[in-house]
Amino acid sequence: MPKQKTNKEMILKFIESKKETVSKQTIKTYLQIANNMSFSVMLSQPTIIKKLNELYDNPNTKAMYLNLIILVRRDNDEPTEKLISFRNGLRDLIIKTRKEKMTDIKDDLPTYNELMGKLNDMSGIRYIVNFLFLKYGFRNNDLNLKYVLKLPADKVNENFLIHSKNKVLLNINDYKTGKTFGEKNVIIEDKKFKEELKSLKLKDGDYLISKKNGDKLKVSSFNEKVLNLTIDRLGEAKMFKILIGHLLDIKDFSKIEKLVETRGTSISTIMKSYNIHNNNESKLKELESKSEE
């Protein structure tokens, strides 16, 4: 009788078959799950469900494990229908949990107008960082920008910033959803933004946010530095929630549609993950209706 393969062996086999279409971060997550999973993905479906319920309370964690378990079982021609049904049932619980968290977050967050008031009192790199978060809904890595006089032919895995006389061009290629949304080009003509950028006296090849010696920062160090530059150390995710809440309040749906492009995300993701009015279904329906016009 052949020796039964371990979870890690089966997951590595699955990764190998999908490595051309799966991101490095996803592969890293898969391997972490493989190392942490204390039961075989080849157990019976009811037993797997029982194990997940015993080990984890968070429905998001259960769903994350289930996603990979289902993929690996399919790759090994094992049944998955009960696992899929269980995962589908978790969705309502995940939505409920998200709504409760959003309600708590809303009560603790400052208003958009309060943030804009603080932004107007800022200068230099702090102004630039918070302006990009509040005006364009950027994620952290969008700001990992290299100042250049001319865009290079090879733009893979880099984001670029060009400051001409009348405008600033942000050419963004390396970001979370880049494989889905592709290259982003954002043109900024705001007078104060251009003045604050000019005051930094960047030279060709400099990074907007860098190590003391000018080198590019590692992701973890970069994220920490950006967090410290944001208003009240709110971070980009909370600032985006505030921005979306404000735009829904004033019913500026066209601006939300522009954020879909500048952030590189979908309206459904915005409404599910960043809408602090998540308990108000009428706002979602209103936005969807407006988007279909």
Image: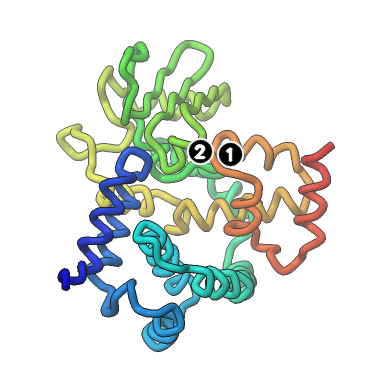
- Residue at the image position 22 percent from the left and 35 percent from the top: 216
- Circles 2, 1 touching at the beta carbon (< 8 Å): yes
Horizontal and vertical percent position of residue 44: 40, 80
Q: How crowded is mark 1: few (under 14 residues within 10 Å), some or many (20 or more)?
A: few
Q: How many marks?
A: 2
Image quarter in which the N terminus is found: bottom left
- Label 2 neighbour load within 10 Å: few <14, some 14-19, many 20+: some
Say which quadrant the C terminus sits in: top right
Is residue 57 visible from the viewing direction of this image?
no
In this rendered view, identify the residue nearer to me: 208 or 174.
174
Q: To which residue does mark 1 refer?
A: 135
Viewer-side residue, 30 vs 251: 30
How far apart in space, not on screen, are marks 2 and 1 (Cα)? 5 Å
Instruction: Give the numbered dot on residue 159.
Output: none
Residue located at (35% from left, 31% from top): 145
Q: Which of 209 and 120 is in front in this view?
A: 209
Task: Locate residue 153, reporting x and y percent.
Answer: 33, 12
Indicate the secondary structure of the residue bearing disc 2.
helix
The disc placed on residue 132 is: 2
Q: Which of 213 and 254 is in front in this view?
A: 254
Picture quadrant where residue 88 is located: bottom right
Q: Residue drawn 23% across and 44% down?
A: 218
User: What's the amino acid at mark 1?
Assistant: Lys
In the figure, is residue 176 to the left or right of 5? right
The residue that appears at 35% across and 36% down in the rendered structure is 144
Q: In this view, does 40 lie to the left or right of 235?
A: left
For mark 1, give the secondary structure. helix
Can I make out residue 274 in this image?
Answer: yes
As displayed, is residue 159 above or below residue 204? below
